[in-house]
Amino acid sequence: MTKQKSEMYVIAVDMGYGHQRAAYPFTDSGKHGIINANRYQGIPPSEQKMWESGRKWYEIISRFKNVPLLGTTAFSIMDHFQKIEPFYPKRDLSEPSNQLTYYHKKIKSGLGKDLVKELNKKPLPLLSTFFVPAYFAEHHGYKGKIYCVICDADVARAWAPYYSNKSKITYLVPNRRVKARLQLYGVKENNILITGFPLPKENIGGPSQKIVKADMLDRLYHLDPRGAYRKKYAYMIDKYFGSVKNIKKPKRPLTITFAVGGAGAQRDIGVTLLKRLHKHLKQDKIRLNLVAGVRNDVYLYFENELKNCGLEGCNNVRIIYAEDKTSYFKVFNKILRRTDVLWTKPSELTFYSALGLPIIMAEPIGYQEQYNRGWLVAIGAGIDSLNPEYVDEWLFDWLDSGWLAEAAMEGFLDAPRMGTYRIENIVLHNKISEIEDTELL
């Protein structure tokens, strides 16, 4: 007798990359794949218009942020609605924020009602990677269990329900700080499970973690070309990866992947890398992946700058672009396997440090990214970028010292990596699989 496949509804929102990136690992378990609450077949036009307006304004202001004075002021006003209050002193923070009140009113007016009605025809566990679908599912009487995945190292009040102490939503959170924060917002402790962020299975390799261990071993030489880190910490490398003598120089050059955010902000840094590393790219000493994601305008921008820099046709520069996000995530996850350094702002990619990727951090955009940065620094897996204009000097100093190898190992050891598997156990099989107390977060 064939065993019936376990399924759930996986709901995200098409805004930036974070919420869909968190949903991507569950595509195969999701009935209908990933459902975007703000863009699905049959969505009421009024709902789609509301979502689209919010997304466009966020992207415009994010790109506008770099304009002196006016850009900073406009972004600060928008970011104020997503403010994360200081954690200490610990106190009651359950009073709903303006952002939460806005969505609460929209839900009371019918936001999400049509989708909930459709899903209630066959209730399954519902996994949402954004708070709004979880809220409207509960408000409109969804008949299945509701789970909400959190995508940052700390969260604003909007991530806890309006009536937080009455909600039955189960939260699946990436670290201990988020659990403690939700409790300050009034969420019951037994409704919060620490699982870690859901990372792509194709970069882990199942319970044995054979893929992530092999990839980590592959990049250690490039991150420590003089062997400073390997000599000092040979005992630790031996413990997790076998003999340090197995580390050989890869056939590929040192590979840096630079990823801009969903709004396309900070793309200029990628151009600076092209200019400052031009000689090394030509001499086959460095390979550079410029991630444009699904933004054709960013792709064309990078393509034009390649021509301006005289690097058109250079085998060591690749623009990563796809027409849809699922295809983009697939190719992005693939190139990460042969990436030595990930250069990005501290978005949800913060948690990809668990793959043994040292993260060079561009300037955070917004409160949540400031807290993500703090988490990365605390575990030692992320390093603030110095001036990109001098990257051809400081990058090689960092490599020679073994600092980036140390950051890679800190991420591998201290950032939770098995979130996808834990979440599937909880949602699909009702098996509580929480991070052990011994793991550092």
Image (tube, rainbow, N blue to C red):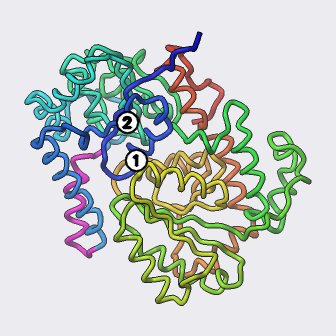
Q: Is residue 352 above or below residue 71?
A: above
Q: Which mark is residue 82?
A: none
Viewer-side residue, 416 vs 13: 13
Q: Quadrant of the C terminus?
A: top right
In the figure, is residue 228 to the left or right of 437? right
Q: Is residue 72 magenta?
A: yes
Labels 1 & 2 near each other (Cβ < 8 A): yes
Q: Secondary structure at mark 1?
A: helix
- Of label 1 and label 2, which has the lower sequence position? 1
Q: Quadrant of the N terminus?
A: top right
Q: Is residue 391 above or below residue 199?
A: below
How crowded pointer 2 is (Cα within 10 Å; few <14, some 14-19, many 20+) is rated as: many
Q: Secondary structure at mark 2?
A: loop
Q: Is residue 334 magenta?
A: no
Q: Which mark is residue 129?
A: 2
Q: Please report the residue visible at 55 percent of the width from the left and 32 percent of the height from the top.
A: 419
Which x, y percent locates residue 100?
20, 36
Where on the picture, by quarter, is residue 292? bottom left
Where on the picture, by quarter, is residue 47? top left
Q: Which residues are magenta?
A: 67-83
In the figure, is residue 292 to the left or right of 251? left
Q: Please report the residue visible at 76 percent of the width from the left and 70 percent of the height from the top.
A: 400
In the figure, is residue 221 to the left or right of 76? right
Inspect the image, locate mark 2, and give the three-letter code of the amino acid beneath it: Thr
Q: What kind of secondary structure does the magenta stretch mostly adopt?
A: helix
Where on the picture, by quarter, is residue 155? top left
Q: Marks 1/2: CA distance?
A: 9 Å
Which x, y percent locates residue 417?
60, 37
Q: Which mark is residue 18?
A: 1
Which x, y percent locates residue 51?
19, 46
Viewer-side residue, 330 vs 338: 330
Q: Please report the residue visible at 19 percent of the width from the left and 57 percent of the height from the top.
A: 77
